[in-house]
Image (cartoon, rainbow, N blue to C red):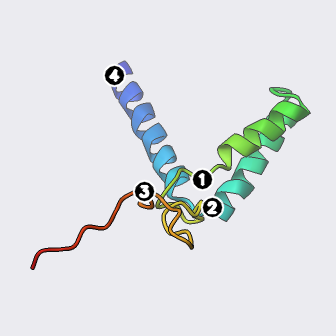
Amino acid sequence: MAQQIVVALIVALAALYAVWRWMPGSWRRAMAAKVAAGSERAGLVDAQQARQLAASLGKTSGCGSCDSCGSCSTPGGKGVDAGKASAPRAH
């Protein structure tokens, strides 16, 4: 019985992580602010820690997220592949 509860908790946490990871950026920032405000109201953190919590939870997770950091396709070729020289292709 205890093993089933542990497995259920692990699956629930994994599902929560997947939803948070793929959530649109604006939704993630709004939810992060609500979580931080709720933590502050509950007395778990002070105001500064709540701001830090909201900032860390609201961060994007890198390339491929809904609100891009701009590193993949920046104008002027300063993105991730900017340092790679393009070699001619053999046909």
**Mark whose residue sits in front, 3 or 4:** 3
**Mark whose residue sits in front, 1 or 4:** 1
Classed neighbour count for the residue bearing mark 2: other residues with Cα under 10 Å, few (<14), some (14–19), many (≥20): some
User: What amino acid is labelled 1 in the image?
Assistant: Thr
* Residue designated by label 3: 83
**In 3D space, how far apart are the residues under numbered discs 4 and 2 (Cα atoms)?**
35 Å
- Left or right: 73 in relation to 89: right
**In 3D space, how far apart are the residues under numbered discs 3 and 4 (Cα atoms)?**
50 Å
Please tell me which residue is depicted at 58% across the width and 64% down the height of the picture.
70
Residue 7 higher or lower than 58, as above or below:
above
Viewer can see residue 89: yes
Residue 32 higher or lower than 86, as above or below:
above
* Residue designated by label 1: 60
- Left or right: 46 in relation to 3: right
Q: Are marks 2 and 1 in contact (CB under 8 Å)?
A: yes
Near-viewer residue (8 or 51) = 51
Q: Where is residue 56 in the image (x, y as percent from the top left)?
A: 68, 41
Classed neighbour count for the residue bearing mark 3: other residues with Cα under 10 Å, few (<14), some (14–19), many (≥20): few
User: What amino acid is labelled 4 in the image?
Assistant: Gln
Please tell me which residue is depicted at 33% across the width and 22% down the height of the picture.
3
| Secondary element at tag 1 | loop
**Mark whose residue sits in front, 3 or 1:** 3
3 or 1: tag closer to the N-terminus = 1
Residue 48 higher or lower than 75, as above or below:
above
| Secondary element at tag 2 | helix
4 or 2: tag closer to the N-terminus = 4
User: What amino acid is labelled 2 in the image?
Assistant: Gly
* Residue designated by label 4: 3
* Residue designated by label 2: 25
| Secondary element at tag 3 | loop
Q: Position of residue 78 (x, y in %)?
A: 53, 63
